[in-house]
Structures are given as C-alpha cells and as structure tokens.
Image: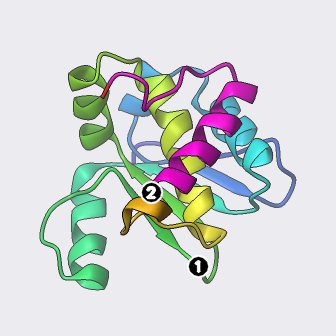
Amino acid sequence: MDDPGSSGPLGGIEIVITDRRWRAHVPDAIRRVGRALVASGCAASVALTDDLTVKKLNFRDRGKNKPTNVLTYEQPPEILLAFGVVAREARCQHKSIGNHLSHLIVHGALHLQGYDHHHPGEAREMEAQETRILARLDVPNPWKNR
C-alpha cells in the first residue's frame, strides 16, 4: 500500500487511497469522492486503488480476469476504482481524470441503490440520473458526445 488512506468528509465513511497516482493526478480526490457520495445519497466506503487489485477482485467475484474501472460491493457498501483503467478511459474520452472519477463514484453509488444498465431502458434511466447528479457537482454530462 502506498498510502495508509485518508478519511473523507462523511463522518464514518472511509475513503482510502492505496495507489499514489490518484493523489498525483487528482489532488482533490478525497473532496471529489465525498461530494459525489453526498450528491448521490450514498453511504459507501471507497478505495481508490490500482488495476492489479481490481483485476484480482474482478476475477474472484465475477469470473472476469481483467481490471475494470469500478467495482461495487453491497455488504458492506464499498466502491473500488482502478487508477490505470480510469486514467486510460479519461484520456480516450477527452475528459479529466477528476471528472471521470466523480462520474464513476456516482455510477457505483447508483448501482448500490439498485440501478443497472444491462437493458436499454435501464441504461437510459441510470445515465439520466448520473447526468442530473453530476450537473449538481459541475461535472459535464459524460454521455453528451458518445
């Protein structure tokens, strides 16, 4: 672990950074995560970690032997993000890593609240909710130019 972690602004909610690249590329990561959780109405712990950690968990829990941008767990409620995947996606989508981080925290929070995107109707509903929450955070609509 590169960083023993930091508690976020949400009282009992823990926000831990285990990959120092998060701090290097998103100096306000703790604040962004806290604001996104509050705006989403979600009380989940968050781990900003690395691709290898997420890859191992993704294989163990979902049978997929690759890293993914965000994993969510219901009990206890937790959201994990993989730095490398998030940074690559942000670069490819021409957005800041910070804004992509905010989006993915909202995305994970909505999953914890029962939203999903496996079917077109569900995806549209979830994307609309993400857009509304992100607008309150002054984060541009991530779905606008796809």
Q: Name the side, left or right, on which 51 lies relative to 31.
A: left
Horizontal and vertical percent position of residue 10: 83, 49
Q: Is residue 126 magenta?
A: yes
Q: Residues within 10 Å of mark 2 (few under 14, many from 20)?
A: some
Q: Name the side, left or right, on which 86 lies relative to 45.
A: left
Amino acid at pointer 2:
Ala
Q: Which mark is residue 123?
A: 2
Find residue 119 and report its image quarter.
Answer: bottom left
Q: Secondary structure at mark 1?
A: loop
Q: Residue at point 64% right, 47% down?
A: 129
Which quarter of the figure is the C terminus placed in? top left
* Marker count (numbered): 2
Horizontal and vertical percent position of residue 64: 16, 74
User: Can you identify the residue that label 1 sits on?
Assistant: 74
Question: In 3D space, how far apart are the residues under numbered discs 2 and 1 (Cα atoms)?
Answer: 20 Å
Q: Is residue 140 magenta?
A: yes
Q: Residue at point 23% right, 71% down?
A: 56
Q: Name the side, left or right, on which 52 lies relative to 9.
A: left
Q: Residue at point 40% right, 43% down?
A: 2
User: Bounds of the magenta span?
Assistant: 124-145
User: As drawn, which residue projects farthest toward the right?
Assistant: 11
Amino acid at pointer 1:
Glu
Who comes first in sequence, dot 2 or dot 1?
A: 1
Horizontal and vertical percent position of residue 33: 64, 40
